[in-house]
Image: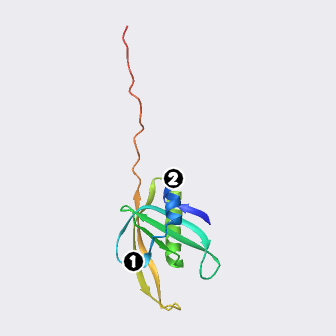
Amino acid sequence: MKILMTSRELNANLKYKLLTSDDSKPIEEALGMQINVDALILYTDTDRRSGEERTFVKIADVDGEVYSTGGSVLVKQITKALEFCEGEPGWTIGTITPSKVKGAKSKGAYYTATINLKEIAQEEPNEAPVEFHLN
């Protein structure tokens, strides 16, 4: 397993939760819902069915739910959004609204999403108060 990108700086605990969570839901369960993204991780791993290395995405929402997908179209869209944000400091993925598109694929459909970016709030520097003493 190799981490490729994240939506923001993730501590070890959150990375571990996202990568090992057995209770993550397939993205299909969020079709038509707007996912308010707290954290997102893009990684490669061995596909359990094919044995080949593939790219996957896990998304944690602000309510603590985790969604996952290995769908190639959705993974490409999220990768492009993350690459854009890397070039634009102060921006990240804010919401993802997955949808299903009927197409000519072998399974007859694929997943896509509307992705909205958000500006990251810049924290004010935490400066200690300056003391003045008059003699």
Residues packed near mark 2 inside 10 Å, few (<14), some (14 to 19) or many (20 plus): few
Q: Residue at (38%, 78%) from the top-left corner?
A: 31
Q: Secondary structure at mark 2?
A: loop
Going by the numbered disc 2, the residue's amino acid type is Asn
Pointer 2 residue: 11
Q: Amino acid at mark 1?
A: Glu
As rendered, which of 74 and 38 lies closer to the eye? 38
In depth, the one of 97 and 30 nearer the eye is 30
| Residue 129 screen position, x and y as percent | 38, 27
Quarter of the view holding residue 3: bottom right
Residue 37 in the figure: left or right of residue 13: left
Of label 2 and label 1, which has the lower sequence position?
Answer: 2
Question: Looking at the picture, does residue 122 appear above or below residue 30?
Answer: above
Residue bearing the label numbered 1: 29
Extreme front residue here?
22
Location of residue 65 by image quarter: bottom left
Q: Residue at x 48, y 91 (%)?
A: 108
Q: Which quarter of the image is occupied by the C terminus?
A: top left
Furthest-top residue in view? Answer: 135
Q: What residue sits 59% from the left and 78% below the top?
A: 48
Could one spot residue 41 in this view of the protein? no
Residue shown at 50% from the left, 92% from the top: 104
Quadrant position of the N terminus in the picture: bottom right
Is 96 located above or below residue 92 in the figure?
A: below
- Residue 26, image x, y percentages: 45, 76
Q: Is residue 70 visible?
A: yes
Q: Element type at marker 1?
A: helix
Residue 99 rendering spot, x and y as whole percentages: 40, 79
The Cα–Cα distance between marks 2 and 1, rounded to whole angstroms, is: 27 Å
